Amino acid sequence: MRMHLESHIKPLMEQFPALGSVLEKAGIGCTSCTLGTCRIQDILEIHDLDTAQIQTLLQEMGEVIYQGAPFQIPPITRKPAAPKATFCPPIQRMVVEHTFILRVIALLPRLIHALRQDFESALPLAIRTLEFVRTYADRYHHAKEEDILFRFFEQGSDILGVMLQDHQDGRAHISAVAAALAARQIEDVEAHLLAYGELLKSHIQREDTILYPWMDRTLTDREVGHLFSQCSAVERDFGTVPAMQERIVTDLELALPGVS
Ligand SMILES: [Fe+2]
Ligand SMILES: [Fe+2]
């Protein structure tokens, strides 16, 4: 199995599709990842598996790959980090930002319903929603990730590539929504808003449960200090804008009550 630790998971899964259910059983969602190009040894690290979990996973993967032929599992020992109640302050702040983004994503079906009922009356709400997504989710939150947090880690790594691609795909969906709103093309508005919502929900879930925990336990205290001061500088630059955008979320919730 040692040679396979360097292998990328996607071509290996194409060759041995049964690996998908082995990984899913271990709580590793590679089959749902958009690119799935991580190396196996990175997966073991990022998902914080302990020695016993690694041995079990490699045993089950070996049984699929070697199909009855003998194979050896390399000795890998790793203790998972002790569970922490919260992340370091700058990452914890980004987790809080996710909650505002998720609240707006939860409103998207209601916004679509309102646009279908009366397009012109609901258009200002759609414009405010786009403004929140562009200003808060993208320019503020994603910029903090791309320009600061992610830079503490190996540039060009597969996992960061997947997350950056999600950001790009999200931007493309939002540009398409803006164009469709201008053209009064409700079908396209709906398709791209829903696709954006699904993309961001999955993206945030992976950040909260896999990426951020891995980053949080990998950063040294000194790096956390640098991260904190750089994020604080961005927050100062944005002034009152993030707080204003967070209040807009409540305004949108009041303007878009649940569809009965
Ligand atoms: Fe992100
Ligand atoms: Fe994020």
Image: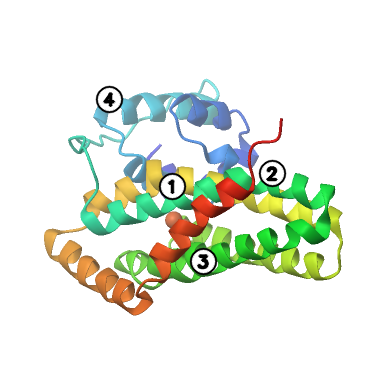
Residue in view at x 47 percent, y 29 percent: 61
Q: Nearer the viewer, residue 70 or 206?
A: 206
Q: Is residue 39 visible?
A: no
Residue 52 - label: 4
* Label ID, residue 99: 1
Distance of mark 2 from mark 3, alpha carbons? Answer: 22 Å
Q: Percent x, y for residue 93?
A: 31, 55
Task: Return the disc, 2 or 1, that comes first in the chain's sequence.
Answer: 1
Q: Residue at x 29, y 51 (%)?
A: 92
Query: How busy is the neighbourhood of tag 1: few (under 14 within 10 Å), some, or many (20 plus)?
Result: few
Does the CB distance between marks 4 and 1 fall below 8 Å?
Answer: no
Residue at figure coordinates x 44%, y 58% from the top left: 246
- In the drawing, does residue 10 fall left or right of residue 176? left
Name the outermost residue toward the left. 221
Q: Which residue is mark 3?
A: 138
| Residue with the mark numbered 2 | 110
Percent x, y of residue 121: 77, 58
Mark 3 surroundings: few (<14), some (14-19) or many (≥20) residues within 10 A: some
The label on residue 252 is none
Q: Indicate which label's residue lies in the foreground, 2 or 3.
A: 2
**In this view, the mark in front (4 or 2):** 2
Q: Amino acid at mark 1?
A: Thr
Between discs 2 and 3, the one toward the N terminus: 2
Q: In terms of secondary structure, where does tag 1 sit?
A: helix
Asked whether the beta carbons under mark 2 and mark 3 sit within 8 Å of each other, the answer is no
Taking the view exactly as shown, the residue that stands out farthest to the top is 68
Mark closer to the observer (2, 1) = 2
